[in-house]
Image: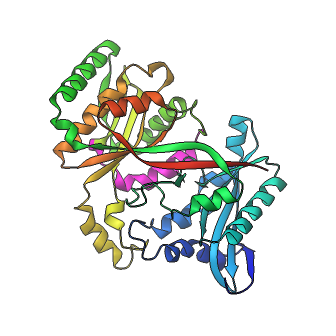
Amino acid sequence: MSGEIYLKEVNNETLKAQFIDFAYNHYKGCEHYIAPLRFDIKNNLDTQKNPFYQHSRIKLWLAFDDGKIVGRIAAIVNDNHNNFHKDKVGFFGFFESINNRLISNKLFDAATSWLKDQGMDTIRGPVNPSTNDECGLLVNAFDTDNVILMPYNFEFYEELILNAGFTKSKDLHALWISKDVIKDEKVMEKLRRIAEIVMKRENIKIRKVNLRDFDNEVQRVRDVYNNAWSDNWGFVPMTEDEFRYIAKNLKIAVNPEFVEFAEIDGQPIGFSLAIPDLNQAIKGLNGKLFPFGIFKFLSGKKRINRLRVIIMGMKHEYQKKGIDGIFYKNLIENGNRLNYIGAEISWVLDDNMPMMKTAENLGAKIYKTYRIFDKKI
């Protein structure tokens, strides 16, 4: 530190641009940080464009040391979360800082103070800006790249957060499943046999997503999602506008070979979504597609060789019936046919034992952990 440390509330477009730019400058030269596209972050923070802010509020701060930006943070009040869970939890997100406790504590103090003024009794994070977006702090595996829509951070962040008085709330795991499972004839034969039995017993039909009927397909996914995940820790039902906003952003990454519905009598009861890891194509672009990054992106798409499994779930009455095995079988077979080396399954709650057990039975291993922290206000 060389001078006075102070915070500025982000209250104009110039400061918001500096808020966004800080992360890109902060990680410059970091081998494994793959910067998200700048327009995605800008839209995520745009209270007019992002329907999340129809029911939520956000406040941003920048930290300065002698005029130089050295950190940032957001404080978020998600009214839909608090109404659904009947609590008073506020959130912090978009946290970045140099390795300095004084600076990080000032940022956390600002977020905490504002959340307390909003009537919150707990601060939780990081979420950017909700659990339906990027969330969690990476606490291991810093020598691996982040996959699409998963965060990356410096190793010292956990110490800064703990120093500010936070404690672990929940761990979110990322598991890696290699295409080599296809070579295990015993596992694959069992998986195919179970899939056949379950499909006959439950009268299930599997179909791929129809992108020509995109709007209606999105509504069908939302219907499954808001039912299937309603008992999960941190879950918040997504509004129709929110779901369509996220689906529109994901559409560019969708390969119908990896997006499936499970249906009974034509009604969706389960859904599986895996997407190619576009981070492999945008690595090195520093978040800029235009004017020249687009050519590198289009070239890089040809080299994508891994997937991310984002969603796999069934409505409550169809859970624990083995339907996920059908999805896994198809994922493994299609991934192998299209020459993917494997897939990251993320994220999975540390206490979601059925999902963990099924994945581990297929040879999937936990290889990354993301942590959510709480602090009473």
Colour convention: rainbow
At which x and y percent is residue 41? 53, 65
Magenta part of the chain: 236-257
Taking the image as shown, residue 298 lies to the left or right of residue 238, namely: left
Residue at (23%, 49%) from the top-left corner?
341
**To which quarter of the image does residue 175 belong?**
top left
Residue at (47%, 48%) from the top-left corner?
369
At which x and y percent is residue 166? 68, 52
Q: Is residue 141 in sight in this rendering?
A: yes
Along the viewing direction, whichever of 45 and 9 lies nearer the viewer: 9
Residue at (75%, 83%) from the top-left corner?
4
Taking the image as shown, residue 27 lies to the left or right of residue 255, namely: right
At which x and y percent is residue 11? 72, 73
**To which quarter of the image does residue 164 belong?**
bottom right
Taking the image as shown, residue 282 lies to the left or right of residue 166, namely: left
Classified by dominant secondary structure, the portion drawn in magenta counts as helix
Taking the image as shown, residue 11 lies to the left or right of residue 151, namely: right
